Image (spheres, helix red, strand yellow):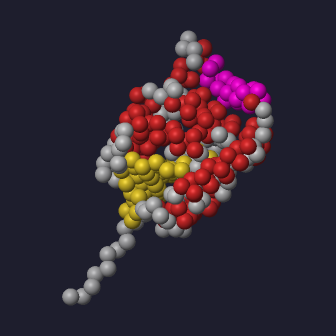
Amino acid sequence: MNHDANLGTASVHECEVAAGSRFKFGANWLRFLEVLTEDHLRSARTSLSEMLPFSLSGKRFIDIGSGSGLFSLAARQAGARVHSIDYDPQSVACTSELRRRYFPNDPLWTIELGSVLDTEYLSSIGEYDVVYCWGVLHHTGAMWQALENVVGLVNDGGVLFVAIYNDQGKKSRRWKAIKHFYNRSSQPVQVLLEASVCVLIWWRRWLKDLLRLRPLESWRRAGRSRGMSALSDVRDWVGGYPFEVAKPEQIFNFYRQRGFFLEKMRTQGGDLGCNEFVFSKPQRPQTSYPH
């Protein structure tokens, strides 16, 4: 991506944040890096290995919306050649910081500021064995276009790993309104909303832990399935805007119509959160020519 395009992307992002139409995801991830531990990394690597149908060693892996950079790092530690992109300059900075800590000056891990909605940019970066975009495309403001745009990044025989917010109908519409309000509010109001949502989501588990004489055990253990942290997830949830949702069958049908096969799926069972899908792109049959 050229320098002028980088400046343009950063400028548009800054304007969207200032207008209250986009959450500062990167600022949240910068705070997460302060508490990042080896347990987070181990959980991230496990999350990838459990869902992907093959080893990442020697594979080309693109992390679309790399955020903190945690899963780019996990893929690189698993032996993949990694390309990380994000629309948020602070997320790009987070990913670059993790590369500096663990793989300084590594030629097999590239990081760029870029948008999944920029088809010209996507056409310039090639194809990959694993296209990974977990909890990202529903924050672009054009989810279905983003879902379409990643199709061309998948190698024949490669996989697409996406996670999209579960459609809860009226609940999802209410959450969208809350998220929009949050991003247009002052910082004190945002902190109050974060605290309120934290209590709303967590009070039952806190109470159970207390009754079992294990106060806050669930909070400390939260996020181990994907290597995140409870507080980062709460901020991301209440602030994550733009915000779109889809039913599992919508995502399944969308990619089936484009020739992909569903390899693995993990849904939220009607609850909030992301439904996860791993789709494979079949190998094209080789054409044989008569001698």
The one nearer the camera, 61 or 19, is: 19
Estimate the x, y position of residue 103 in percent, counting from the top left. 36, 39
Image quarter for residue 3? Answer: bottom right
The one nearer the camera, 145 or 161, is: 145
Q: Residue at x 65, y 40 (%)?
A: 24
Quarter holding the C terminus is: bottom left
Instruction: Say above or below: 211 vs 126.
Output: above
Q: Residue furthest front?
A: 4
Q: Residue furthest top?
A: 213
Instruction: Say above or below: 212 vs 250.
Output: above
- Is 68 covered by the magenta stretch? no
Q: Residue at x 45, y 31 (%)?
A: 40
Q: In the drawing, does residue 278 fall left or right of residue 197?
A: left
Is there any visible trace of residue 18 in the rendered image? yes
Q: Residue at x 72, y 27 (%)?
A: 191
Estimate the x, y position of residue 75 in percent, counting from the top left. 39, 44
Is there any visible trace of residue 52 in the rendered image? no
Q: Main secondary structure of the magenta part?
A: helix
Q: Residue furthest bottom?
A: 291
Estimate the x, y position of residue 44 in percent, counting from the top left. 44, 37
The one nearer the camera, 146 or 174, is: 146
Estimate the x, y position of residue 53 in percent, counting from the top left. 37, 51
Q: Residue at x 35, y 74 (%)?
A: 285
Q: In the drawing, does residue 137 fall left or right of residue 18?
A: left
- Is 200 covered by the magenta stretch? yes
Instruction: Say above or below: 171 vs 259.
Output: above
Q: How many marks?
A: 0
* Magenta segment: 188-207
